[in-house]
Amino acid sequence: MILFVDMDEVMADTYTAHIEHYNDRFKESLTKEECMGFEVWQKVPAERKDTIWEHYYKDGFFRNLRPIQDSIEILGELNKKHSVYVASAAMQFPNSLLEKHQWLDEHFPFIHWRNRILCGDKKILRGDILIDDRSHNLENFQGRSMIFTSPHNIHTNHFERMNSWQEIAKELL
Amino acid sequence: MILFVDMDEVMADTYTAHIEHYNDRFKESLTKEECMGFEVWQKVPAERKDTIWEHYYKDGFFRNLRPIQDSIEILGELNKKHSVYVASAAMQFPNSLLEKHQWLDEHFPFIHWRNRILCGDKKILRGDILIDDRSHNLENFQGRSMIFTSPHNIHTNHFERMNSWQEIAKELL
């Protein structure tokens, strides 16, 4: 079985990083709980919205993300049983390309370079399952689409939902 | 129609660059004609083989490649008629990721970031046509496979062959 796994907010905790960078910069104490149902940029004052987007262009932003809980162990197991590919829409942020590759080398060295895809539009992927946090990626996929829970997508109802890597393990291992 | 186009030796003249870097370094005068039917590394003395491979890791190698004749004009036209995606097996050379993106920005700005794929294994591509110079990429593709002529593949017979971008234009425009 060919399994595609998105990086940001599925393997890498981009959401928490946005909150932390924001709090650092503005000496605020925004929490993930307060953001439930929204994007981080929707929960900050209007004049600071653009600063959230700027994080994506900061050197080291993608390189220093924390892996999502249990993702390393469970992807390690899935990788023994299925053809696991990482598929990240990284092209929007050219500075992220090398950082994402190095981040995978550090945290997911068992994902061979042949199984890494940095792309834009994910509708060109051919395989059995896509695990992603974004509806626009899941909608165009021809196989089985699984939405991985992130604060911004908790009200999305039209995909099979995985709340944690433990739930993915139960389903696919 | 979804059309995937490889970069090295289809859009970018990697083969000539290898010969030029080799000739520069060793004060030689190897020509493309002498290499017909072979990889560049097969036409240099055994003790220099590894130096060809090293080119891939030189800063600027991918950034400074010349576009293949007629590729810009004809891909510009194809891009108006079809969904054109660039698909390059770039993951093997992490230093190439940003250089390839910048090279596309310079020479093929009309290929939107959504339509750029830097991957490893190309068997995960879902679309209608793949134009590539490498048999191992073409063999695993589920659609129509077209081999783009490069000195190393002139004896490969089991794919529809395109000798130039003019031939591609005749077939697909």
Image (cartoon, coloured by chain):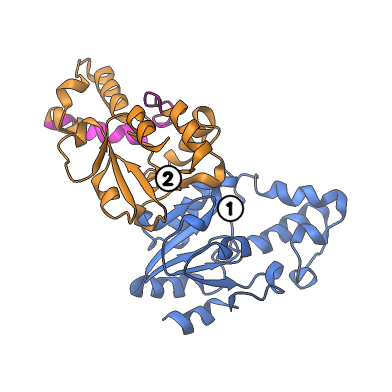
Chain colours: A orange, B blue
Quadrant location of residue A157? Answer: top left
The answer to which of A126 and A66 lies nearer the viewer is A126
Q: Are marks 1 and 2 in contact (CB under 8 Å)?
A: no
Is A61 a magenta residue?
yes
Taking A51 as reference, is B157 above or below it? below
* Secondary structure type for disc 1: loop
Tell me which amino acid carries mark 2: Leu
Q: Residue at x 51, y 52 (%)?
A: B100
Is B161 a magenta residue?
no
In the image, is B53 to the left or to the right of A67? Answer: right
Binning the other alpha carbons within 10 Å of mark 1 as few (below 14), some (14 to 19) or many (20 upward) gives many
Looking at the rendered structure, whether the residues under marks 1 and 2 are on a common chain is answered as: no
In the picture of the structure, the residue carrying the numbered disc 2 is A3
State the residue lying farthest toward the left.
Answer: A46
Tell me which amino acid carries mark 1: Phe
In the picture of the structure, the residue carrying the numbered disc 1 is B62
Quadrant location of residue A53? Answer: top left
* Mark 1 or 2, closer to the camera: 2
Q: Position of residue A163 (x, y in %)?
A: 27, 30
